[in-house]
Amino acid sequence: MGDKPQLFKFDLVEERYNAMGESDTYIKPMVTSEFSKTMCGGINVLNNIKVPWDLTCDEIIYCLEGTFRLVCDGEEYVCDRGDVLFVPKDNHISYEADGKCVIFYAAYPHNWKQLAGITKVPGIDPSDFVAG
């Protein structure tokens, strides 16, 4: 039998969610290489912000609350509550929200930051940053 399931509660982000600035983003990695050898995932709260990014992993985004927008090559993909978006790696994108929104993300591979040599991601607290 393999490893056991891990439960992550919204409580892990609730304090930061309630204290979001007027233009802010907060990413809470939950599933990391500590738990999985293949994928990672967590919660991203965005509030009135645009975050440009070069995506180096495949990503699935599930909109939990509000409206999330991803812009890729000038095309907008608008996600409302309950919508799922697949974003393939090697795209220059922008994560955007005109108000407060909450998304869940899952990414593959789990060590995409390490593979790309990334040591900082906007919105991830240094104490939560896991490279691999």
Image (cartoon, rainbow, N blue to C red):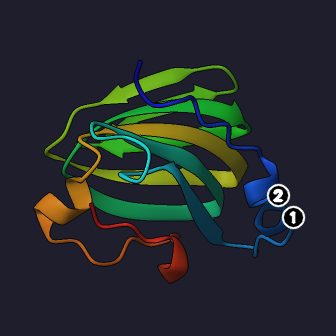
Tell me the kind of residue under disc 2. Answer: Glu
Q: Position of residue 40 (x, y in %)?
A: 39, 43
Classify 65 as above or below 97.
Answer: above
Tell me the kind of residue under disc 1. Answer: Asn
Q: Residues within 10 Å of mark 1 (few under 14, many from 20)?
A: few
Residue shown at the point (60%, 41%) measured from the top left: 103
Question: What is the secondary structure assignment of the residue under circle 2?
Answer: helix
Q: Is residue 64 visible?
A: yes
User: In which quarter of the view is residue 14 placed?
Assistant: bottom right
Residue shown at the point (61%, 65%) measured from the top left: 26
Quadrant location, the N terminus: top left
Tell how many labels. 2
Q: Residue furthest front?
A: 1
Instruction: Report the disc number at residue 105.
Output: none
Q: Nearer the viewer, residue 99 or 21?
A: 21
Marks 2/1: CA distance? 6 Å
Q: Is residue 67 left or right of residue 10?
A: left
Classify 5 as above or below 25.
Answer: above
Q: Residues within 10 Å of mark 2 (few under 14, many from 20)?
A: few
Q: Is residue 118 left or right of residue 128?
A: left
Q: Position of residue 88 (x, y in %)?
A: 22, 32
User: In which quarter of the view is residue 106 placed?
Assistant: top left
Instruction: Report the disc number at residue 14.
Output: 2
Q: Nearer the viewer, residue 6 or 107?
A: 6
Q: Is residue 72 left or right of residue 45?
A: left
Residue on which disc 1 sits: 18
> Are the residues tagged 2 and 1 within 8 Å (C-beta)?
yes
Q: Position of residue 117 (x, y in %)?
A: 14, 71
